Amino acid sequence: MGTSESIPRLSSVTQRGERRVDDRRSVAPTDDPVRLVGLHRLVRGTMRSFAETVAESVDEVFTVALGAVGSFCDVDRAYIFQLDPDGDHLSNTHEWCGTGINPEIDNLQHVPIEVAGPWFEAFERDEHVYIADVDELPDDQAELRGILAEQGIRSLLVAPLRSGGTMHGFIGFDYVRHTSAFSRADLDVLRILADSIAATMSRLAAEERIRHVALVDPLTDLPNRAMFTELVEQGVTLGTPRSRVDDGSDHQPERRSDRAAGRAVVGLIDLDQFAQINEAMGFEAGDELLVAVADRLQQSLRPEDHLARIGGDEFAVLIDGAVDESSAEAVSARLVAALSEPVPVAGHVLAVTASMGFSIDDGTFIHASDLISAAETAMREAKSLGGARAVAFDKDSGQRLAQRVNLALFMRSAEGLSGLHVAYQPAVDLATGQILGVEVLARWEDADGSPVPPDIFIPIAEESGLIPNITRRVVETTLCDVDERFAPLVDGVLAVSVNVSAFHLTQTRFMDDLRGLIDHASESGPIRIWVELTESGVMAESGVVVEHLQMLADSGVRIAIDDFGTGYSSFARLRHLPIAGLKVDRSFVTGIQDDPINQTLVRAQVDIAAELGLLLLAEGIEDEAERATLASLGVRFGQGFGLHRPMGADDFEALLRTQRAGD
């Protein structure tokens, strides 16, 4: 075979049967009984080796077979060419050369298939190609004659590697030292060898397809959990000396000694609030998001690292070469940062965050599952802390996870809601200090009466499906307090703000409950309900949320965006949402008196609110300097520990009485 752009159609082509096209040299028959016995043994042994071969040993088996057949047929070179994955090129993949014959395999890689075009026309007819004497090729085949001469070929015989309608390539014999007519036995051996090799290739390809289905995620084409576990198992068990771990038993497991080089890191990445996005925007949008996330994570890794999708919205990474925990933290930070930019999905721009847990192979993990389990424990710890962060596995993580599970069980029990309480944080006029509204906050105590921080119980409540029950209880308690205790102490309307997840606005039962409570509130006196949603939640959700927001607005509920300025708002879209208020995120407020950049950003938010006719309130005010600066920038309303801390109903009632007495 050669590497020119084309090869003239060959006149010396013979079929597998008896018809002979070459009119100058025939394929000589043989009736040598000794040779026939040798041929029988060769074929039997070769076919047995092919039947038993597996993917890991196929190259060696093919090369050995070429050597055995090449020696038997007394040729100078035997070889296999296979089609490249692109289907447009050929490569010499296996070669055997007789003593003193120069190999050509390195010179014949990724050869355009057009070079062997005429041969493949014969192969499609299940015919072999035989050139008895390259030097005697006619002048109209001079180009072919030159190409074969460059490889030192004097005579050649090639046959297709074809099985079940699939063309894999071809196999060939060359004579280099002198021309030679191939015997009928030579041709039979070549065709038997070709059929056996092609069948083996088809079998191994089918096995690889089955293995691919079993080990590869069909959506992202990444390894799945099974393959990832195999990869981690190799990292845990290979390449390091092992020593016995003394556990007092007769059958002691092996423990690997310290690594001389960097250690493997396993990281588990779980998308925050993916279920809400999937429910609100549909499964196709969810799949599109997963593919985009997979691509971003892959781009943040080195070629030698491994990324897998091991669950619905859960990815895993295997990274070698981490020296210590700080190295692992740097890796995890790079992965989380890969998701920091908004992701365009189904015509929307989504702000995606992720929780990551990782574990480092310190030599104490016996199995891959242990290392993965440790990373999963750390990942759950990251989610329990509010998500959008990475946590390393440590000895306390398991205990904290157990405590979290126990809390979830208590919260779902019959007496669980008895631990729920309501706190009120006033919102005031920054110029006068007058209380104009209050944000309602859920507080929880565990079975022992100990307070549970919101960043722990709220994620548990969301995962357990308790948020609708909690919201209903909080609103019911608030309306009762307003009716019986607060309303008589307020001149005018008291604004009551409740935090709601955009996801829950897609739920029919939740909306029915909320509308019922709103109808009750409209009859209860001087109260105006505000519903607060995070900026990223409003921007990421689908049309059903916008529809329900409009429904709430039409019923008199005011909608406010919490954490404004942190969620990649589309101002064009903001104008078309039924929004009545914005809350300046505390990240802009902290130390604003000494931060000219944040002052500029807050002033811009003041202008946006004024232009759109929205109420603007700053949260997280900690001291007088921050209050005064915000007031000077045009912010009229605010809340924070520097003004009033969250308090129980008794303390809030007392505060209203004090304000009324002062007025």
Image (cartoon, helix red, strand yellow):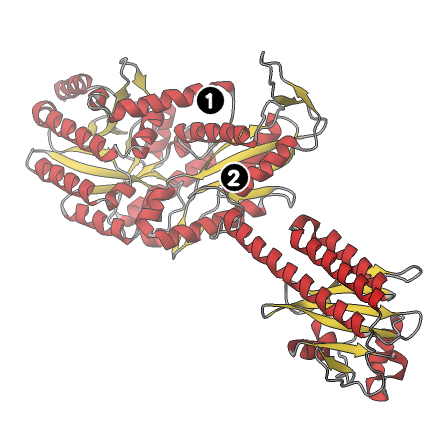
In the rendered image, which quarter contains the C terminus? top left
| Nearer-the-camera pick, 608 or 298 | 298
Q: Position of residue 377 (x, y in %)?
A: 46, 28
> Looking at the picture, does residue 68 appear above or below residue 619?
below
Whether residue 199 is visible, yes or no, is yes
Helix, strand or loop status at disc 2: strand
Q: Position of residue 355 (x, y in %)?
A: 45, 35
Q: Which mark is residue 316?
A: 2
Q: Residues within 10 Å of mark 1 (few under 14, many from 20)?
A: some
Three-letter code, disc 2: Ala
297 left or right, relative to 115: left
In the rendered image, which quarter contains the N terminus? bottom right
Helix, strand or loop status at disc 1: helix
Counting residues from the start of the chain, the first of labels 2 and 1 encountered is: 2
> Looking at the picture, does residue 397 appear above or below residue 180?
above
Whether residue 591 is visible, yes or no, is no
| Nearer-the-camera pick, 226 or 259 | 226
| Nearer-the-camera pick, 377 or 37 | 37
How far is disc 2 from disc 1 in space, using C-alphas? 19 Å
Outermost residue on the top side: it is 248
Three-letter code, disc 1: Ser
How many numbered marks does the figure carry? Answer: 2
Q: Which mark is residue 397?
A: 1
**Residue 110: quadrant of the picture:** bottom right
Q: Residues within 10 Å of mark 2 (few under 14, many from 20)?
A: many
Q: Position of residue 272 (x, y in %)?
A: 40, 39
* Residue at image point 79% right, 83% down: 12
* Residue at image point 68% right, 62% down: 196
**Residue 262: quadrant of the picture:** top right
443 left or right, relative to 232: left
14 left or right, relative to 529: right
